[in-house]
Amino acid sequence: MKLYYDLHIHSCLSPCGDEDSTPNNIVNMALIKGLNVIALSDHNTGKNCPAAIAVGKKNGLVVLPGMELTTSEDIHVLCLFERYEDLQKLEAHIARTRLRVKNKPHIFGHQYIRDENDEVVGEEEDLLIVSSGVSVEEVAALVDGFGGIAIPAHIDKAANSLLAVLGALDPALGFRLVECAHEGVTSLPRIVNSDAHYLWDISEAEHCIEAETCSAHGVFAALRRMAGN
């Protein structure tokens, strides 16, 4: 079946994310846009994923747990998982290596953790848009080892992308799928996402993935097939 997706959406937990991007608002906007599946992918954390997944289940929207990891080279890599428990393993790993810089909310914005009722249950004090301490050479194998898929994010952008920083995509890095808005940039299979930091930036129902079931398992299996796994 065809499932319309947007697998790169930031919530109010990302310092550059809008405070209106709460779990409920994100899910409802995705439904308004006609999407079947989304992924929440905040910078270097997945702590708002449980709330978004719970809200999605209540409203018939598949929500994959994800993270936009910043490598040591300042390259953004989208890390997607079928299960939140696996994403937690990645987050625990980078919690030991991530740079510790206190957030300045008046500059970068608050980093709110919310529950499924959109109530604030915490706030990350350390800035999340810094290096995770994981190099681009190790990220694909690391994420795969935790049961996820590592996808170089927005590779056709001029900032924080693998091509902008390294100039080329070396097959030895182990990536098998990329996020790219334009065709012909690489021979690897691609997905197209919004990288939404505001609710109105969430994708319309334009890009679809063929999956056997409308479920986290079905979508993740489809992504693995696209990546040749």
Image: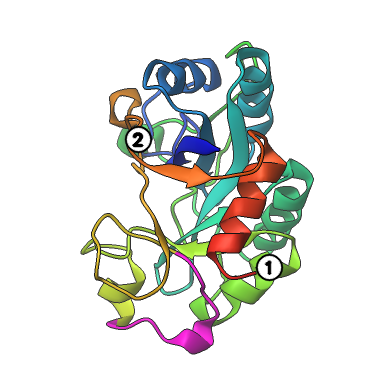
Looking at the image, residue 175 sits to the left or right of residue 55; the answer is left
Depicted 14 relative to depicted 158: above or below = above
Tell me if I can see residue 155 in this picture.
yes
Image point (51%, 89%), residue name: 172
Residue 174 highlighted magenta (yes or no): yes
Image point (61%, 22%), residue name: 56
Label 2: how many residues lie within 10 Å, few (<14), some (14-19) or many (20+)? many
Tell me if I can see residue 98 in this picture.
no
Q: Which residue is mark 2?
A: 197
Q: Earlier in the sequence, mark 2 or mark 1?
A: 1
**Residue 101's x, y, as percent?**
49, 53
Label 1: how many residues lie within 10 Å, few (<14), some (14-19) or many (20+)? some
Of 3 and 29, nearer the camera is: 3
Residue 91 disc label:
none
Looking at the image, residue 96 sits to the left or right of residue 104; the answer is right
Q: Quadrant of the N terminus?
A: top right
Q: Quadrant of the C terminus?
A: bottom right
Looking at the image, residue 155 sits to the left or right of residue 82; the answer is left
Q: How far apart are the alpha carbons under marks 2 and 1?
A: 26 Å
Give amino acid for label 1.
Asp
**Residue 208's x, y, as percent?**
43, 42
Residue 3 highlighted magenta (yes or no): no
**Residue 45's x, y, as percent?**
59, 46
Image point (59%, 44%), residue name: 211
Of 12 and 198, nearer the camera is: 198
Instruction: Please give the range of residues in magenta.
Output: 167-177
Tag 1, which secondary structure? helix
Residue 144 disc label:
1
Magenta stretch mostly in which secondary structure?
A: loop
